[in-house]
Image: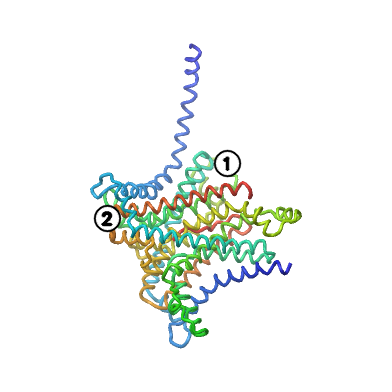
Amino acid sequence: MKKQRFWPIMMILLGAIYFLLPLFATFEFSLRERRGEYSFDSYNYVLSDPQFRDSFVYSVALALATIVVSLILIVPTAFWVHLKLPQLRPVIEFITLLPFVIPPIVLVFGLIRIYSRPPIVLVSTPALLVAGYVVLSFPYMYRAVDTGLRAIDVRSLTEAAQSLGASWLTILFRVIFPNLRVSLLNGAFLTFAIVLGEFTMATMLNWPTFGPYLALIGQNRAYEPAALAIISFGLTWICIGLIQLLSRGSQEQGQLAGTR
Amino acid sequence: MVDKVLEKNVKQPAARPRKRKVRLEWLGVVPFLTFALLFLILPSFNLLIGSFQDETGNFTLANIGNLFQPFILNSYWLSIQVSAVTALGGVIFGFGLAYASIRGGLPSWVRGALMTFSGVASNFAGIPLAFAFIATLGRTGFITVLLKNMLGVNLYDTGFSLYTFWGLSLTYMYFQFPLMVLIIAPAIDGLKSQWREAAENLGATSFQYWRYVALPILGPALLGAGVLLFGNAFGAYATAFALTGGTLNLVPIQIGAQIRGDVLHNPNLGYALAMGMVVIMAVSIGISMLLQRRTARWIQ
């Protein structure tokens, strides 16, 4: 038994080193601002930078808008397909997987090409960026909602609500949404984590979000980028941690990432 | 003859209301489909059409032909190399880790910790990841300085640089193998321990078990995951941009430069460049899905 365990332990150790060493190094690096001693100066600089606050708040607002639009689009659609149009499921599934095939850099290229000239000009509003983010959230949101719907008896719930005189809106908001709470929160946190640090689309569409701010600091400062990396890692950790906390006990892995 | 006419008359009224009902139900998916059409399908389609047009809008194949100039072929080749190397590395290392944590006889918290960490690390891509590796292996990074002070080795004298092919690949690995861990864990769970016991009872060595039982079963899953990792690295822009500042000639970097300011001096060639990327992504994701379906036959 002991001999059998040797390789697994080595493997895990190697993995732990690869995982943790860059984090440790980044943290150490972020403390080097003052010559000769460790300090939190770089964190101070970042946290008191008004641009940090502005871009962060801006990204949070975009993330919330993305989550709301994505929920409004995906939940009723997935519910309806589940209940009435099961033959359409492969089509919807295919569309929600397309963002894996069309990387953000290509998608934003197409969005700019279409919406920077009449009949519809959208490049001057952040709505286009939100629309792009909603598309990026499709695979995660749909997967989360679809998994949730499979786990509950949609038909019985709907029929019970209908026989009590509920309208479709009541059914959606007071029966389906509460029953999908965990899945919806899963999708929402993942979308939040993705939108918060997103760089490609934001920079191409020229909006002052957190991602482009990170890039700017990376070009101009020495130790602050490391501090920002630690902060971003912490935020990602919180989002994913909340997802895992919520879906404890279920086997479903809800947090597969895409390209960035 | 008369019977047939009667049949028709009887059938039609019954069929009509049913058809109308189906049409009404379709309205439920219209908002989603409209959104997808406007912000996903039309933009992509627009690029596709643009890549077959010249600057005055006439049909041409010249853009596709122009993709085969050395400069552009090189960027595809470099992107393919980075993606293939990090996919292969991710598959081997990710599988090893996942297998060790699930079947290595280690306490169960190891698996839980690995899964949580993989969830975080596979999402920790983009600019912060580039910063982390610059702080670790850049010219004044932690490991670089440590090696210089303790062993007197200057990493950058040995030919290594974070801002080249191998540096970028090493950085990509940080989100590649956690993704592999997440994808492959269910397949490893599906490997029944009875199969190993049966093989051992029949006198199989460990090598024979892997060669004739485990790998053939896991093969499609491993290959499918590898192709998915390939696509994952192939489309990445932010990490590469933040790390190399656009000096590495990768396809996403080229497309980014083209969006910022028509560096190819031909917008339509830019569309063709983007479409070439979509084709490669589509082929890789398609293969991956096919293979995953084949795995599902064995592992449930």
Furthest residue in direction bottom, as rendered: A36
- Label 1 marks a residue whose chain is A
Q: Residue at x 43, y 85 (%)?
A: A34
Furthest residue in direction right, as rendered: B201
Q: Is residue B109 left or right of residue B50?
A: right
Query: Disc 2 marks which residue?
Result: B266
Res. B8 mark = none
Residue nearer the viewer, B169 or B11: B169
Type of amino acid under label 1: Arg
Type of amino acid under label 2: Asn
Question: How far across and how far down the image is residue B40, in percent?
Answer: 39, 50
| Residues at marks 1 and 2 on the same chain | no
Question: How far across and how far down the image is residue B281, in percent?
Answer: 44, 53
Query: Disc 1 marks which residue?
Result: A155
The local crowd at label 1, few if under 14, some if 14 to 19, many if 20 or more residues have their Cα within 10 Å, is few
Q: How is the image coloured?
A: rainbow
Is residue A114 in view? no
